[in-house]
Image (tube, coloured by chain):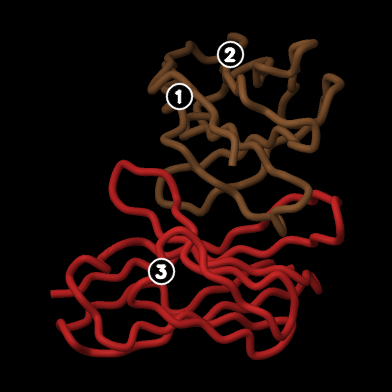
Chain colours: A red, B brown
Amino acid sequence: NAGVTQTPKFQVLKTGQSMTLQCAQDMNHNSMYWYRQDPGMGLRLIYYSASEGTTDKGEVPNGYNVSRLNKREFSLRLESAAPSQTSVYFCASSETRGSVNTEAFFGQGTRLTVV
Amino acid sequence: DAKTTQPNSMESNEEEPVHLPCNHSTISGTDYIHWYRQLPSQGPEYVIHGLTSNVNNRMASLAIAEDRKSSTLILHRATLRDAAVYYCILRSGTSYGKLTFGQGTILTVHP
C-alpha cells in the first residue's frame, strides 16, 4: 500500500514563482491535511479538508491555497513564493466521523526552498 | 486546543525501558491522548492513543493518570531505531482529526 504520496519530494523556487504541491491517499480517508515544519519545530497546520468538497484554514494559512480535487487528492498551491515559505511540507490523511479518532498517516514530505 | 508539556530531550541506553512523560493539565473529557513520533527526515508516524485506560500495542504502552492530567509513553526495550522526536498530542473528537504539534521530546538512544 502506498499510503500518502506527495510530489515532488524536493523543489527550489525563486521568489515570486508559483507551484502546486500534490498529495494523494489510497486509504479512502475522508479527511486530509497540509502541515509545514520549520527547522527544529513541530508541525503547524496550514489547511485541512474534513471531507470531500470542504476546506478550512488552519493555524498558518496566509500565502497558501488548497483544492480538494476528489476524495483521494488534496493539493497545496503557493501563488507567489516567498523565502519565509522555505520549509518541509507534510500531507496527512485520517478517517474522522463524529468523535471517531483514528490515526493519521503522513507522507514523506516535500522539501521546499525559496531563494 | 488544550496544550501539552513535554521535556525537551531524554536519553536512554539500548535495550533499556524508556518512560516519556507528558503533562496535559487542561485536558477536557472528550480529548484523546495521542502519541506520534518522527524519525529523522521522515513524516510523523502514529504510535498509540488512549482516552482513560492504559493501552498497549506492538510499539509501546500508554499509561494514563487517573485524573488524566498526565500520561507516559513507555518503550519497553529501546532500540537505536527508536531515536526520534516524540509528540504527545491531545485530539478532540470535534476537531476533524486535526493535530496540534508542540516541540516534542527528542529521544537519544545510546548503543
B40 relative position to A28: left or right: left
Q: Is residue B45 visible?
A: yes
> Which residue: 65% across, 37% down?
B90
Q: Give coordinates of residue B101: x percent, y percent.
A: 50, 43
Q: Quadrant of the C terminus of chain A?
A: bottom left
Q: Give coordinates of residue A27: x percent, y percent.
A: 78, 70
> Which residue: 50% across, 27% down?
B80
> Which residue: 61% across, 19% down?
B25
For label 1, the residue is B107
Q: In the depicted view, which residue is nearer to us: A108 or B27? A: B27
**Chain letter of the residue carrying label 1:** B
Image marks 2 and 1: residues in contact by CB distance under 8 Å = yes
Q: Quadrant of the N terminus of chain A?
A: bottom right
Q: Amino acid at mark 3?
A: Thr
A38 relative position to A43: left or right: left
Q: Give coordinates of residue A36: x percent, y percent.
A: 41, 60
Q: In the depicted view, which residue is nearer to us: A33 or B84? A: A33
For label 3, the residue is A110
Secondary structure under the numbered disc 1 in the rendered image:
strand
For label 2, the residue is B18
